[in-house]
Image (cartoon, helix red, strand yellow):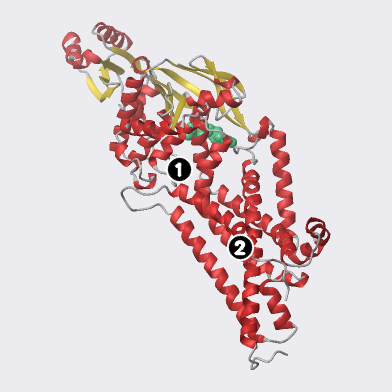
Amino acid sequence: MIDPAAPTFWPQLMQVLLEGTWETVYMTAIAMAITFVVGLPLGIILVGTEQGRFLEAPFGSRALGRVVNGLLGFIVNLGRSVPFIVLMIALIPVTRWLLGSFIGTGPAIVPLTLVAIPFFVRVVEIAVREVDPGLFEAAESLGASRWLLVRRVLLPQATPAILLGTATTITSIINFSAMVGVVGGGGLGNVALTYGMQRYSWIHIVFVVIILFALVQLIQWALTALAKRLGAQPIRRGPKKDATADAQAHLDADLALPSSRTPTHPSGSTP
Amino acid sequence: MISIEHVSRRFGDGPDAVVALDDVSIEVPRGSIFGVVGQSGAGKSTLLRTVNALERPDSGRVVVDGVEVTALEGKALLQARHQIGMVFQHFNLVGNRTVAQNVEFALEATGAPKKDRRPKALEMLDLVGLAHRADDRPGQLSGGQRQRVGIARALASGPDVLLSDEATSALDPETTRSILELIQRLSRELGLTVLLITHEMDVVKRICDAAALMETGRVIEQGSLDDLIRTPGSRVAAELFPVGEAHYIPHHRIIDVTYTGLSADRPVIAQLARDFGLDVSILGAALETIGGHQAGRTRLAVPGDASVALKVIDSLTAQGVTAWEVLA
Ligand SMILES: Nc1ncnc2c1ncn2[C@@H]1O[C@H](COP(=O)(O)OP(=O)(O)O)[C@@H](O)[C@H]1O
Ligand SMILES: [Mg+2]
């Protein structure tokens, strides 16, 4: 048992929570960044290779389109149906091979990313599906290349929905990141595990819950606000900024966020 | 010039197959406006989409200004599409981008250098009277304004051909008129060949030089409006001149008289009564402005037998109007 009356209790609690929070944020941010970079194109390809869509015949081959579509769909469904804990254990050899270790915060990012990608692909899939088919038709009629179509029509229109889905994806990564404490993954989950479960400190648990709740709220709020700003048809008149460029900038910022923070803090420390 | 030659297209196979196009041939001379009319599901959109290869026919070919569109693939097809503009019923503008950016997209598609795009887009918007709304979102514009943006976008790459899929069907009558006037003006100024589809006869009447009527994938009749209104039994003409159904009247013959241009001003029916001393009654009449000219149709009931009808028709023809007997 830990004694809350001890003079070192509160400073130590602060220290542990700060470290845990940082580790959670760090794991989530990197996992989300990779998920985004991998999942966005996969989601676009998954919908695009459907029959009658802009990628139904990549490189002029309908057969290739069908194969890619079938394969992607299968992998995504498979990925979504494997329970996280099973995935995490199954990945131990892969992670060890990739990073030389499967213990710690860094390695925990591997299963987190792998569980998030199928989820995020589905998010992108839904967002892309909601783009008015008429817009694709118009772009095609203008003789636009597929790449231009994706960049100037699909992404601007799908961005708000993708942002909302990103918030949900981050929330579930945070959720799952609490579980990687089991393999020494660190983060707030590990704090709850070591102090709460093993040493019966309910104070630790309460704080962990509060911090996790605040994190999720903050992300949900920020991304929802951003999506609203980009998606809502503005009613204001007069000259205004290019919201699409904004959307792009924010997406870029999203991607840059983890990598710009990574080097400033050592990872993989477990209390 | 657009030349659609024996084009067929079916969707699905087996008993559920839909024959959307059945051996359709249409020719649209350079610089003219051609309207395709027909009920929903007749195959109009499918036909129009074969012209820019958004739809590939199962057989037949489409040639646009000497280029066989149906044979194109890849880059060559993209380039051909730069020469064929298209406007849509629901405008299909990208809502998250500004009006100018929507037009610039068409220029970017052609590979125009970045610095040239905005000036050109503004020039196109000026052409449709919307340069002052360049930095607004499409959502801030009215339907008619959005369609103007659609037209500016379609014409930004300088095409010779404009395809229009029910471009005015989502608009109120007054806005429809202004959009039609714009299309007609641009067609004249830019020498555009226009192929438009519509289910509104009014559109054909206002701007088309020629028209085709489609039904279940087939062209039932086609020709210049001048010819169609002089063709006995033409359904397009019947739609243009709503003189009602022909009912049997005992001891009478029913004659349709169609007059265009100058003859519309002449009192041909009064003349008829004077010449033959017949008690002619008017069953229905419609006076329309078709392609900028006055044209009308009057349905007469003439007492007498077939020989009287023949004499009356000869006399009318001699006066420069078109007349034929209608069987009730
Ligand atoms: N992509 C498609 N798949 C299956 N059927 C289609 C497709 N496009 C059109 N059709 C069918 O072809 C027929 C003609 O459609 P369309 O050309 O859109 O007619 P219209 O424009 O005259 O209303 C309709 O029966 C329609 O259901
Ligand atoms: Mg249609």
Position above or below: A180 against B198: below
Q: Is mark 2 within 8 Å of ligand 1?
A: no
Q: Are marks 2 and 1 in contact (CB under 8 Å)?
A: no
Cα separation between marks 2 and 1: 28 Å
Q: How many marks?
A: 2
Q: Nearer the viewer, mark 2 or mark 1?
A: 2
Label 2: which residue? A170
Instruction: Specify whether residue B51 is in view.
Output: no
Residue at 64% x, 82% y is A13
Q: Nearer the viewer, residue A239 or B304?
A: A239
Q: Amino acid at mark 2?
A: Ile
Label 1: which residue? B94
Q: Callout 2: residue from which chain?
A: A
Q: Quadrant of residue B253?
A: top left
Residue at 49% x, 22% y is B219
- Mark 2 packing: few (<14 Cα in 10 Å), some, or many (20+)? many
Name the residue at the front extreme: A264
Q: Position of residue A144 (x, y in %)?
A: 52, 33
Position above or below: B148 against B327: below
